[in-house]
């Protein structure tokens, strides 16, 4: 099938490297193509209003495990992930197109559960489902969602807008979704060895919910409006703080200093991390799937976020030559690593 | 995993039934949500201009077989399928978002081939690739493409606009893609039994190309512009003439009379069908994947299409009570059946 004698494994480039490799030659031809590959969503210019479009695919076995993810939660999360990408442009999600590929091992009732979750989230985020498709798949369950939003041109926030000395802020707390996943994976392993043992998930509701029913921070975008605060750059945290901070730095041509002691971590996440012998900071930096917003603001806007329970200032932007630094609790400066999920190296 | 005691097999509803069942409760909330589920694409109102969005997913094993579909052709076709949906609204495709899930059995070079095909088609159809994603999948190759187009509101053509006595027309010829597929399937079976036998595809270029490298009829939409012809309703033929004629009738609340002898079938398609002991008319009615346009025009526009080599008048619209009729070559009227691919009944 593939005659090309050269076979470079995808893992050599990694997920980000592969997409960069495949898309670097693209040249945009239409005036309406305001922005292409390289931010949270694509932008289509309609004059005063911009249409913001983002697509995401969720694949059984890669993005979810039906052994512990109920279909209703899966549907809900699929919507959240896409809404989050639109919000990260400071835009308002309004429409959604849902395509599902499913094998006949799923009965109609299972599809109803999945769609119940999709509709519940569409309701919460006030999004219309305007299109979609179902098709068969003998590979497993695949969900593909395209979210469409609107923004006034002057309201859009890009990854590339950060300036030196801007404050680096994050909404909510981090690492919970990752610890929720660890917990579910452990219970799955226990169940497979000893089906008679009941799962012990007491007091772990918070991290389980962070994994199974995450929320996109529409409230944060609304707060920005009320505070008359326009971030200088923004991204949503799907791949872990470290990787997202890298994206903001690279897109803005800057470095950053990120203070370990400032990273907001919930006590439940902290306790679970210690229980699993994982450094809680590592959960926040590399865990991902928190769907919080990472953004920079001008130092002159500091008063607007100061004392808020919703935002934490975790660092500031530096010039490019200073690099991306993590300042540890001990005061040491170490280089941040962009990790992300790098799902290509772990798969079969 | 699924506790619900009721298990209705998806095949009981079929592909169209399932999507209807899952989406019938949707109510649109946003003023900008001009149209949702039920036509070739979703419509988002931006004032004078309408953004047209369509998503499609192609799954290995369901929609393509990598044993005989080269990756470059697959990429090309994935673009064509989506461009065709936008054209079927009489809109202009301008942007595209491409997501690919791939397992590590594919080297980087294979991804390059796939994207070469995608870029080649994007070039032919003058579409910008503005976003995308690659992710890993241990299920196989999955392609998800979202196409975005623009139209002036008054230019849009819906499935629902046909009126009684309108002429039913089709572009190009039908059934070729289906016969191409039969041929490839036969050669695959031969190869699996006797790998030493060289495939015999001489003189079959036309139907192979219809299957492997179909084209969307952008030229037809441009001709409409030049002819100052606005169809009253339109749909693209992805599932076979019969199923698409059904959609136009149902959406417009009408019946139709379709004349078997008028259905345009290429001599190569005709010969291959006879060779396979298949009725050529059945190929055209149920084959699908031709990506021609099926449309209705007002009888007063007949002069504009008369004698054109690009269009064929194959019937006319009737009132709903008259039903959907196929008038056979022998002059008999039989009921049309909506078949489509019904991929749910053939899968594992």
Image (cartoon, coloured by chain):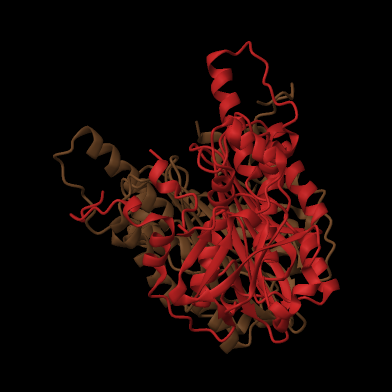
Chain colours: A brown, B red
The reply, left or right, for residue B42 in relation to residue B16 is right
The reply, left or right, for residue B93 in relation to residue A276 is right
Please report the residue visible at 58 percent of the width from the left and 50 percent of the height from the top: B288
Most extreme residue toward the left is: A196
Q: Is residue B184 placed above or below A136 in the rendered structure? A: above
Residue A259: quadrant of the picture: bottom right
**Numbered marks: total:** 0
Please report the residue visible at 77 percent of the width from the left and 75 percent of the height from the top: B229
Question: Which image quarter holds the C terminus of chain B?
Answer: top left
The reply, left or right, for residue A140 in relation to residue A228 is left
Please report the residue visible at 31 percent of the width from the left and 54 percent of the height from the top: B12
Q: Position of residue A195 (x, y in %)?
A: 18, 38
Q: Position of residue B286 (x, y in %)?
A: 53, 50
Residue A83 visible? The answer is: no
Q: Is residue A125 placed above or below A178 in the rendered structure? A: below
Which residue occupies the foreground of this view, B103 or A17?
B103
Q: Is residue A11 placed above or below A25 in the rendered structure? A: above
Residue A151 visible? The answer is: yes
Most extreme residue toward the front is: B330
Q: Position of residue B281 (x, y in %)?
A: 57, 48
Residue A103: quadrant of the picture: top left
Which residue occupies the foreground of this view, B131 or B270?
B270
Q: Is residue B45 placed above or below B75 in the rendered structure? A: below
Q: Position of residue A32 (x, y in %)?
A: 79, 71
Which residue occupies the foreground of this view, A246 or A256?
A246
């Amino acid at each position: 099938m593939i005659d090309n004698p050269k076979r470079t494994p995808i893992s050599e480039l990694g997920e980000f490297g592969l997409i960069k490799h495949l898309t670097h030659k693209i040249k945009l031809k239409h005036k309406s193509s305001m922005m292409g590959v390289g931010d949270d969503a694509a932008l289509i210019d309609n004059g005063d209003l911009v249409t913001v479009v983002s697509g995401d695919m969720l694949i059984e076995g890669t993005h979810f495990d039906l052994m512990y993810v109920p279909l209703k939660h899966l549907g809900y999360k699929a919507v959240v992930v896409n809404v989050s990408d639109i919000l990260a442009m400071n835009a308002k999600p309004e429409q959604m197109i849902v395509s599902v590929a499913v094998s006949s091992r799923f009965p109609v009732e299972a599809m109803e559960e999945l769609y119940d979750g999709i509709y519940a989230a569409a309701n919460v985020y006030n999004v219309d489902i305007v299109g979609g498709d179902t098709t068969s798949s003998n590979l497993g369950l695949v969900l593909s969602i395209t979210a469409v939003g609107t923004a006034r041109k002057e309201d859009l926030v890009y990854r590339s807008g950060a300036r030196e000395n801007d404050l680096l802020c994050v909404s909510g707390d981090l690492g919970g979704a990752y610890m929720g996943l660890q917990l579910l994976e452990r219970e799955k392993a226990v169940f497979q060895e000893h089906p008679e043992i009941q799962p012990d998930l007491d007091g772990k509701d918070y991290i389980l919910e962070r994994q199974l029913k995450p929320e996109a921070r529409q409230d944060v975008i609304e707060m920005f409006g009320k505070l008359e605060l326009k971030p200088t750059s923004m991204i949503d945290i799907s791949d872990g703080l470290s990787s997202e901070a890298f994206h903001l730095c690279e897109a803005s041509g800057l470095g950053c200093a990120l203070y370990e002691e400032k990273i907001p971590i919930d006590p439940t996440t902290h306790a679970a991390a210690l229980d699993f012998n994982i450094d809680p900071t590592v959960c926040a930096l590399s865990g991902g799937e928190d769907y919080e917003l990472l953004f920079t603001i001008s130092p002159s806007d500091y008063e607007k976020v100061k004392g808020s329970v919703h935002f934490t200032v975790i660092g500031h932007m530096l010039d490019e030559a200073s690099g991306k630094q993590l300042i540890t609790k001990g005061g040491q400066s170490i280089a941040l690593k962009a990790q992300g999920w790098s799902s290509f190296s772990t798969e079969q």
